[in-house]
Amino acid sequence: MRIFIALEFSGEFLESLLNSVLSLKEKYPGVRWIPKENLHITMAFLGDTDPALLPRVFEAAGFASGFPAIHAKCGKIFTLPRSNPNVLAAGFDIGGDRMAVLAKTLGENLEKNGIIFDKKHGSFLPHITLARSKTGLKKENMPLIPAEGDLIRMTVFESRLAAQGAVYSALSSVPLKV
């Protein structure tokens, strides 16, 4: 099973984000926009994971029930990776520091539970992947995304790759403390 753990948004945050993204669709016509139901903030990508390890993954993510909900505000759009960028992502002006603490704690809990995960991309960078391009993206002055709202739950997802893109299924979800 291909597994990742992500933060999910309140409906208010998601609507704010989608309204902000509408203005970008004309500026970037050649990209594949991430569907509404797939928008999230990846906290840890576990990749191919033995289903027998899922109880340990759920246990490691369970600490989030004691972590306060995060109020977040997006900032500028940026491209990833630095060389040959093909991803449009939204960064955060508010809340990114708290997301980093949550990601660090999650990583420690996963390791305590014997779960090895993908750290090849370096340190945690709080962002929402908005779109992908097969032909690459120009580095240019990027607009702001004024989306704002709360991050309300941490979810363990299975990701299945399909011709039309990834299909995510929630396996376990823990609400953050309100």
Image: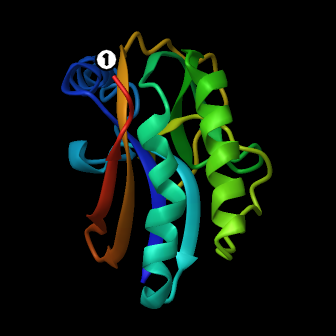
> 10 Å neighbourhood of mark 1: few (<14), some, or many (≥20)?
some
Percent position of residue 76, x then y: 56, 17
Q: Secondary structure at mark 1?
A: helix
Q: Residue at x 77, y 48 (%)?
A: 83
Task: Kindly identify the amino acid type of the residue bearing the numbered disc 1.
Answer: Ser
Residue 18 horizontal side relative to residue 31, left or right: left
Q: Where is residue 18, by image quadrant? A: top left
Q: Residue at x 31, y 61 (%)?
A: 172
Percent position of residue 19, x then y: 23, 18
Residue 89 in the image: above or below residue 61: above
- Please give the residue where the numbered disc 1 appears in the rendered image: 20
| Residue at the far front in the pictured view | 66
Marks counted in the figure total 1
Instruction: Work out whether residue 49 can be spotted.
Output: yes
Q: Residue at x 77, y 63 (%)?
A: 120
Residue 91 in the image: above or below residue 29: above
Residue 121 in the image: above or below residue 99: below
Report the colour scheme. Answer: rainbow
- Quadrant of image for the C terminus: top left
Instruction: Work out whether residue 129 can be spotted.
Output: no
Percent position of residue 75, x then y: 53, 14
Residue 170 horizontal side relative to residue 82, left or right: left
Residue 32 in the image: above or below residue 115: above
- Quadrant of image for the N terminus: bottom left
Q: Where is residue 126, by image quadrant? A: top right
Q: Is 49 in front, or is 114? A: 114
Q: Is 45 in front, or is 20? A: 45
Percent position of residue 105, x then y: 67, 45
Residue 168 horizontal side relative to residue 128, left or right: left
